[in-house]
Amino acid sequence: MSSHTMNSDYPRHKKSSAPLSFPPASFGKCKRITSRILSSHCQVGNGTSSNTHDTVLAESILVPIVTLDEPVQQKAYWLLRTLRDTPYGRITFAKELRRIKMPCVDSTFPEWEATDKSCAIKEMDWEAMQEKRDKLVEDPITEVDALQYLKEKFSHDKVCSNRHVLLPMKLLSDDHRLYSILPFCDGGELSNLFLDSRLLEENARIWMKQILQGIAFLQSAGVCHRDISLDNILVLNNKCVIIDFGMCLLVPFLPPEDPPDLADEEPYLPLPLPSLKSNPVSFDEFDMEIDSSDINDSLHTVPSKRKSPSLSACPIVHGDTTQSRMLIKPQHRCGKLHYMSPEVYRSTCPFDGFATDMWSTGVVLFIMVAGFPPWEFPCDTDERFKHMSRGKLAQILVQWDVGLSLNLMDLLQKMLYRDPKKRFCLDQVLKHPWMTAVK
């Protein structure tokens, strides 16, 4: 195996551990009420209304309960319609309400006014969580714990203002449900941009840079997502954000006093890419083993369009963690099969959480530029996986006449090697010529 294809961020020791637990999240108390509110088209100024009769009877208003810090709540949420159901409840479209300051007490005058600010509220039923939490891979408590952990860890870090991760604005609970108040992603799923087609390379590069910024944000906090997919990337204000953290893990790190048992490895040396002016196309200069004799005939057929398918926590990290980050002991299969890394699919050996997220991100990039998933299953019973993940990705894509550039095919191959020690890490992907190209 050539040294230039090594994952330069792979942990340099063999120590593994179970993932760490996120600190428990704290929830504000709330109550659901029915009340009359001023509809959005009412004119309100200086705390009074020009039309006190134009009101709406609003059911399902979520009102935070007063606290010592905020004795009078100035904001509430009007739950309007279900966006989609979830295993533990639903996600609801809501409008923010603001309290109306009245000059005098009048029981017939509405307390709240609807604003033009939208949000999404993830409602999770406590009873359903108690019943299903041990039966499903997705854990809603882990999700809210992780999101609050991320929010608090970077609350004062201005560098992470464009983090491309959807964090909650507030966490609330009552006797029946847990509520995660989230920004409403007006652009929907990223995949909506190319439902019946695929993205041009220059457009895919723009979105991929944002996705990688989100991955960098998570890695700097020591978090691996384990369910990166196009379904879990939404568009908010024309920028993409990563969502759904019910399967994420907090990566264990060696304590500072525990010296790592380093393996003897050659340093990573980047290989210069060949000129793209060569004609006809040649793969000889790339790190690809081209031998068509053992490729199954089925690989000559382009697939159909995609289908729906004592340790320490990490400090804020912006540098090398290869000597302190630990492998994670086998957990269980999780995520979507198209995006699942082979080591998570097997679930028999310790794995690097960062490397498995980069695999899934590579599949995201593949689908964006090709318009279909590279394989159905991440195991050798799938012929496409068997050959693509061993260095023949570019040859197969050329046989399918997909029409991708050499640089892009090289990057895809290096993100989708089955061996995580050979797979590119985040920093290597960001520095790859396809990612740094300017058009």
Image (spheres, helix red, strand yellow):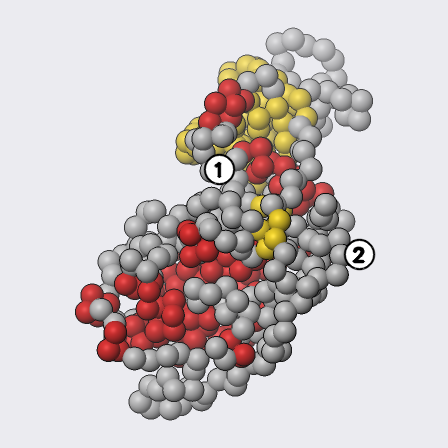
Residue at image location 61% in from the left, 53% down from the top: 16
Quick check: can you spot residue 305? yes
Q: Which residue is mark 2?
A: 257
Q: Position of residue 305 (x, y in %)?
A: 27, 57
Front disc: 1 or 2: 2
Q: Is residue 338 above or below residue 435?
A: above
Q: Residue at x 48, y 77 (%)?
A: 1
Q: Is residue 25 left or right of residue 376?
A: right
Number of numbered markers: 2
- Residue 232 is tagged as none
Q: Residues within 10 Å of mark 1 (few under 14, many from 20)?
A: many
Indicate whether 63 appears above or below 381: above
Residue 202 visible (yes or no): no
Q: Position of residue 139 (x, y in %)?
A: 52, 35
The three-letter code of the residue at mark 1 reads Glu
Hey, which quadrant is residue 266 in on the image? Answer: bottom right
**Amino acid type, residue under disc 2 in the picture:** Glu
Query: In front: 259, or 82?
Result: 259
User: Of residues 365 and 396, which is closer to you in this image?
Assistant: 396
Image position, residue 149 (x, y; %): 67, 42
Q: Which residue is mark 1?
A: 138
Q: Counting other residues with Cα less than 10 Å from the Cα at mark 2, is it few (<14), some (14-19), or many (20 or more)?
A: few
User: What percent of the width, then of the height, locates residue 298?
Assistant: 20, 65
